[in-house]
Structure formats: C-alpha cells, structure tokens
Image (cartoon, rainbow, N blue to C red):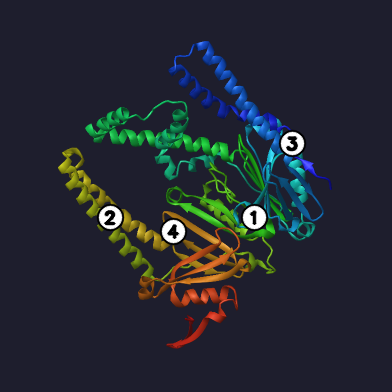
Amino acid sequence: MTWRSLSARSLWASSVQSLAVVVPVVVVVARVLSGLGWATAAIVWTGAGVALLTVAAVLVYDALRLRATRWRLTGDRLELRSGIAVRQHRSVPRDRVRSVDLRADPLRRVLGLTVVKVGTGEHAGEQAELTLDPLTRRDGEALRRALLPPDASAAGAEHGDGVLAELRWSWIRYAPLSVWAFTGGALVLGALYKPLDALGVEAFSEETLRAAWQWVSGRPWVTVPLLVAGNVALGVLGSGLLFAESWARYRLEREPGRLRLSRGLLTSRSLTLEVRRLRGVELREPLLLRLGGGARVTAVATGLGKAEEGETEDVAALTPALPRAEAARLAARVAALAPTGRAGAAAREVPEPVGHPRAARRRRLVRALAGVAVLTAACLAWVSWAERQGWEAWAGGWVWLVPALALPAALWLAVDSYRSLGHALGARHLVSRHGSVARRTVALDRAGIVGWTIRQSYGQRRSGLLTVSATTAAGAGHYDVLDVGHDDGLRLAAHAVPGLLDPFLVPVVGGDRPLVDAAR
C-alpha cells in the first residue's frame, strides 16, 4: 500500500489554535510599548504585525510537519514516518495492536477531523502509542475497523452482543461526590492565575493577600464557613459541568470480539478494545462516592496508553459514577467476557471476597491512634507558636477540636478499612478488595497472572500477616491482597496459578495439617 499523508485540514485547525498564543503575546508587546511611550497607532500596527508573524510561524511549522509525516497500513504492519529535524520511522505489527482511540475536540469536530491513537500494550513511554494527528473522521473510522476487525469466530460463539450501558442523566447526582467538590474555588483561582499572569495582571499582589488574610483572621467563625460554602458551591457546579462534558452521549457496546466506548459532549472520544486483551475489571469506590451509593467501573487491559495532560478521566474508565448495584452488574458482565479456555457457568461467576484476620484490624487501629497522637502534638506546637505571635484568635480552645474530631474519624476509617479487606479465588478470577478512602475491588483473570511478589514487614511478621501481589501485563501491572493471613496468602498464590510459585515454597508441618512457607 502507498504512503499516505495526514489531513491538510490541520492547517485550518492550527490557525485557529494559534490565537491562544497570539493574544498573550500581543498583550505583552502592547504593555511594553505603552510603557516606552509609543503612540497608540504604532502600538496597534506593531501588535497586528506580531500577530500575523505568530500565526504564520505556526502555519509554517504545521505545514512542514504535515509534509514530513506519512503513514501506511500493509497486510501485517502499521507504519509511520515523522519528524522535521530528526526523522523517525515506527512500525507496529498489526497483531500487536491492542486498542484504537479516536478523539476530536470541538474545532476538529467542526472540520471533520479526529486524532487516532493506536495502543500497542508496551510500557516504554512513547512506544506505548502510535498517534496520527489528524486524519479525517472517515479515514479514522476506516483505520479502526481495519486494525480491530470484528471477530467472526467470536460472533458465532458469543451471545449478548449489543449495548451494555448507556448514559442516564440521573447519574449526574454522583458527580459532586468527590474531594474536588470541596476545592472548587481554589481550582478556579489556580486556573485563572496563568492566563492573568500572561496578560500582565497581578491578581495576587502582596497587598491583596494581606487584606484577604486580615479579613479571614478578623472573624474566622464567619469567614471560614463562607469560604467553605463558596468552594463547595463552585465545586458542585464545576463537577456537574465536567460530568456533562466528559460523559454526554456515553455508550458502551459489545461487538463481536470487541468493546467499544463512546462519550463526550464537546470533545468526542471513541475507544475500541479487543476483548481478548481484557485481563479483568476493577470496581472503584472513593469514600464520598461510596457513602452516596455509587461506584465506577474500569478495565484491566493491555494497550490502553496514558491519559493526556489535562485529561479528567482515566483512560481505562468504562463508566461514569453510577449506582453501585448497576456498576457491580456491569463489572460482572465485563469480567466474564474475555475468553480463557474455561467453560461453564462457574467460570463466569465472580466470587464474593472473604474477610481477613483480626490482626489486620489491630494494625489499622494502632496506626490510627499513632496518627492522632502526632496531630495532637502538632496542635500543641501550633498553639504555643500562635500565642508567641499574638494571634489569640488562632490559639483558642477551638484548636483542640481538630484532634477531638480526628480521633473518631481515624478510628472509623481504621475499622472501615479492615472491613473493606477481602479476597477470593474463583474458577476464573482472583478477587482482591482493599481501601477505605478509595476502596477498590479487582477481579483479575488468573490466566493473566505472570508472577507473584510476597512482602512481609516487621509488623506483619509479628501479626502473622503478609501481602501477596499478583503481577500482570495489564492495568497497574500488579494487584495486591493486603494483610492476608500467612498460610492463606501463600495457598492463594499457589492455587491461583498452579505450579508458578512451587519452586519458592517448602513444606512445613504444623499441627494436624501440612502448611507451606516461602523458601528463603
């Protein structure tokens, strides 16, 4: 097949995007020339010249990039040649393609363009993806279909193809259940700082900060609740808007041999993933979301690449926040998709995790009490320092409310963290659950486990516990079973992948049953 070029419509997109550079540059030039006493007409003409030169420079660079970039799809490879000063030639075997991601921001959507990212499953930085920026929407869809064609054998053997999940706008109620909802004002100020600073506006001068501090410290009982309420209001509004932008038109579909996810209001995204690359599924329940009865589902798979700068959602996310019962049902359906050679209903069932020894709860309670003790000492030091500075308003008895409130919260989190611990071994999956502030339940396909790491700290040895970590080529790379009983953990690893751990185990006779221990 002949070499093909990227879409020339990219020049139109670059000309519009260059305005983000032109505006601050022109403003800075105008401020400098105004300070030098230039006439208004001279400043206007100079600014116009600078703007034209900036746009021209961007267009010249993009034209050179387009001319230097060529790609082609052969019978067995996807090839890309790129680079203006330093030439690169990348070649990806088609059987190494794991996913195809199509993304288009509002400007590219108007121009009928899309950015195509081909995931290869590698973990070596830029080698993990091959990017074609941009192709026409038609060419991008054609390339996706060619790289990940429908699996005819899967179409004949599988049932239940079709829509797995679609957006329900009632799910937006879960959007504010995040820690970011309490930092809305701070995020807005942080986002405004850079553009204001580029325009020469000093929004956070020393005088402004001093006046703000005097206002807050003068009436803390009034100002602090007002600041918190403002933060929360902005956070709730922002999280709702972000949900709408990220998950509008959400649809998760099951195609023969593939999963396809599409979503996005302004910036559209379409991700296609081969089912045979799935190694499991993860149910994520951050604390606030869990208290609200929600959860998210993410895929444990190879070839998903990395999130872009400014990306608000995990590239592996299969759903937005939704009711936990629906998330659990969808996670079970996704976990049962990937073919592993095991048949029958038992192989498709994901077992419920069982709890861990009470020694794990004791460890968490001890850590919680130690943390509160450190916090109490810090409050004592703060009160002493504030009194020496003459800040009586900040050295009152209310300071001791911090450790007083922290104690029950820490104890609750410790007990909840213990209750979250669990593991199970099914006919097909290893299930691990842990975490309180961010509870995660992972159903990992046993066929995808390629190694084990056994860790045991000094405290764990005294408590008869250890941590078993399953290594896999997908997702995070490893998934832990925390603070499991010593014998249970070793048996779990030995039975999950028979024979893999045997060279590192020695028999130990204890009591009336044979045990195993890690060889030293």
> Image quadrant of residue 207?
top left
State whether residue 28 appears in this view.
yes
Circles 2, 4 touching at the beta carbon (< 8 Å): no
3 or 1: mark nearer the eye: 3
Q: Earlier in the sequence, mark 2 or mark 4?
A: 2
Residue type of the residue flagged with mark 2? Leu
Residue type of the residue flagged with mark 4? Gly
* Residue that badge 4 annotates: 435
* Residue that badge 2 annotates: 407
What residue sits 76% from the left and 61% below the top?
A: 157
Q: Is residue 421 toward the left or the right of residue 84 in the image? A: left
> Image quadrant of residue 177?
top left
Separation of marks 2 and 4 at Cα, in angstroms: 19 Å
Asked whether 256 or 349 is in front, the reply is 256
Residue type of the residue flagged with mark 1? Gly
1 or 2: mark nearer the eye: 1
Q: Which mark is residue 7?
A: 3
